[in-house]
Amino acid sequence: LDREAMAWAQARLDQLLKPPGSLGRLEELAVQLAGITGDPLPAIKDKCVIVMAGDHGVVAEGVSAAPQEITYQILPHFLQGTAGIGVLARHVGARLVVVDVGVARPVSFPGVLVRKVRAGTGNIARGPAMSREEALQAIGVGIEVATEEVRKGASLIATGDMGIGNTTPSSAILSAFTGLPAEETVGRGTLVNDTVLQKKREVVARSLAVNRPDPSDPLDVLAKVGGLEIAGLAGVILGAAAHRVPVLLDGFITGAAALVAAGLCPRVRQFLIASHLSQEKAHRHMLRHLGLRPLLDFDLRLGEGTGAALAMPLVEAACKILKEMATFSEARVAAMHEDKLLRS
Amino acid sequence: LDREAMAWAQARLDQLLKPPGSLGRLEELAVQLAGITGDPLPAIKDKCVIVMAGDHGVVAEGVSAAPQEITYQILPHFLQGTAGIGVLARHVGARLVVVDVGVARPVSFPGVLVRKVRAGTGNIARGPAMSREEALQAIGVGIEVATEEVRKGASLIATGDMGIGNTTPSSAILSAFTGLPAEETVGRGTLVNDTVLQKKREVVARSLAVNRPDPSDPLDVLAKVGGLEIAGLAGVILGAAAHRVPVLLDGFITGAAALVAAGLCPRVRQFLIASHLSQEKAHRHMLRHLGLRPLLDFDLRLGEGTGAALAMPLVEAACKILKEMATFSEARVAAMHEDKLLRS
């Protein structure tokens, strides 16, 4: 991060028409954005939500309450604005980019980018999700898509996922990197019942025993127990950070992608903003591991980037406070009594 | 609240293209808004932030780190969009209405509504803030302003305060209604140091001993230890609720106004949405007493309606989810396996 831009932003925040620090997390965000962009007065001009879609062989184990074909069927509804992220991306004025990086069925919907690396992953309960080469290729898709959006002008990128069954590999990734047992990392996803929850735990434990992912090799973890959309999202994070563009994480699945990205390049964590704390219980372990504090706590568990989109106006507000508020001296307003403030 | 509209909204939410309940608090908000408006598909067409400004005789006791003239000096900066709420109201696309209900100096700034009931309150450490008639008159100003905004089309009203020294009467109001001692209800306001904090506690305790406000008579509490902008805000809340328009509370001062309004008419609580949990510590007691759960936890302590404005896009998002998402059957997407869900 650009320490000089951050110091400048902080100094200006302290002079604005308000008690110092009284805009709390908005001020913290403004300083982070100055550091990310290198601009002491950062502005969000163009917002973009990137949704990566992929399918999961592990659904054969019965770990999901949703039929696999939903991954495919819902894609046009994103772009028509009749599914969750479609509604929320429009609400916040963000462009929506939907990418097929690994949907099981052939996809040809107007507007959906087809960058399929393979038609769904292998069943991680029995073997690897994909090869190391495929994982790298899917990361490459994410880097390319993010780079293209930055080229079009995106100054804030929200991440979203679509992939029936993808809380299972996300839990496996969390277990692989943190050493936490499946009991701690597996949650109810779409709100599955106790029977399915128990099965999910067994499947995650088995996926780790069968594949033995190496936590010191993030690409190994991703290839063995990850997912194609998770790989794509890790690429989006890496690509955006490389261009100094802030990235809003969504929930549990984009969090798993962030673990992979941060494993490959620890500095990307500084470019991340956690939009919300998911209702998926292990999400808090993920955010702690990433060192991130969520903006919202809304009991969301839909994914698709819905929480990340919802947080976009908050990030914009932080930039506007810094850029558009006047200082006490600019406004010729009487200064605070410094001697009565806690910090003086 | 309209139970039929709420049941209809809930039924639709359960059929939308997402696992049931997966949009968490957005779904709760959507149902509440259906109940408030009586419309099963409520829409926010026009948003309005109402800021009430007033001065406080109690600043003579040295309880604030800001000079009193700021209450007056900052008003034009609200409307020019160069102070906190000016920036955030513009950001969220809300009309900003600024009302002088009790500023100490004569006010004549373009755009500021002058409805002054008196030029600042009396010093509550030595006597009542105002007479019962003045308190009623200031409530009347708030009801009138809210009614006028509803007539212009406002379908969501955010409340904001401006008044140097106004955390002190707000703490006194909280103590009066809850019986909590000043040690529990007084906080650092603009972040005053330990010396000023101790003085604030003594002043609040003295204001209660001197005035003996009757908690069973909310108008008595308001007149004896309240403020003119607090009275005006209580009126805004009552006026908006009477027209079935949802009200976004801001922080500690609008919370004190809500305690008064809820004291006068307990049912108004159902029309309130708590935008955020303030950094002012006793705010959590206030919200608990009102039975409200805040949307944001951003360590804000500026007031002016900044937190309430920040939450407006979240409330709009809730309405849009309900109105704009398609159901599984409308979208011809495969249904969830009900037998695997927790609730079936």
Image (tube, coloured by chain):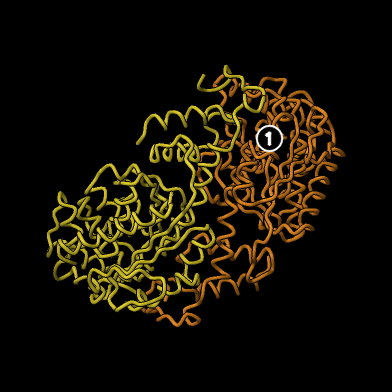
Chain colours: A yellow, B orange
**Residue on which disc 1 sits:** B77
Going by the picture, which residue comes out furthest to the top?
A: A339
> Is A276 situated above or below B105?
below
> Is A74 situated above or below A44?
below
Q: Quadrant of residue B71?
A: top right
Q: Amino acid at mark 1?
A: His
Residue A128 location (% of width, % of height): 15, 66
Quadrant of the drawing holding the N terminus of chain A: top left
Left or right: residue A291 versus residue A331 is left
Residue at 39% in and 29% down? A4
Which residue is at the front of the view, A32 or B167?
A: A32
Left or right: residue A175 versus residue A28 is left
Which residue is at the front of the view, B158 or A319?
A: A319
Asked whether residue B223 appears in the rendered view, the answer is no
Q: Quadrant of residue A164?
A: bottom left
| Element class at badge 1 | helix
Which residue is at the front of the view, B170 or A143?
A: A143
* Callout 1 crowding tier (Cα within 10 Å): few <14, some 14–19, many ≥20: some
Protein chain holding label 1: B
Residue at 84% in and 40% down? B115
Residue at 19% in and 53% down? A218
Asked whether residue A224 appears in the rendered view, the answer is yes
Going by the picture, which residue comes out furthest to the right?
A: B133
Residue A211 location (% of width, % of height): 13, 63
Residue B315 location (% of width, % of height): 58, 57
Residue B87 location (% of width, % of height): 61, 42
Residue at 71% in and 54% down? B266
Left or right: residue B178 versus residue A182 is right
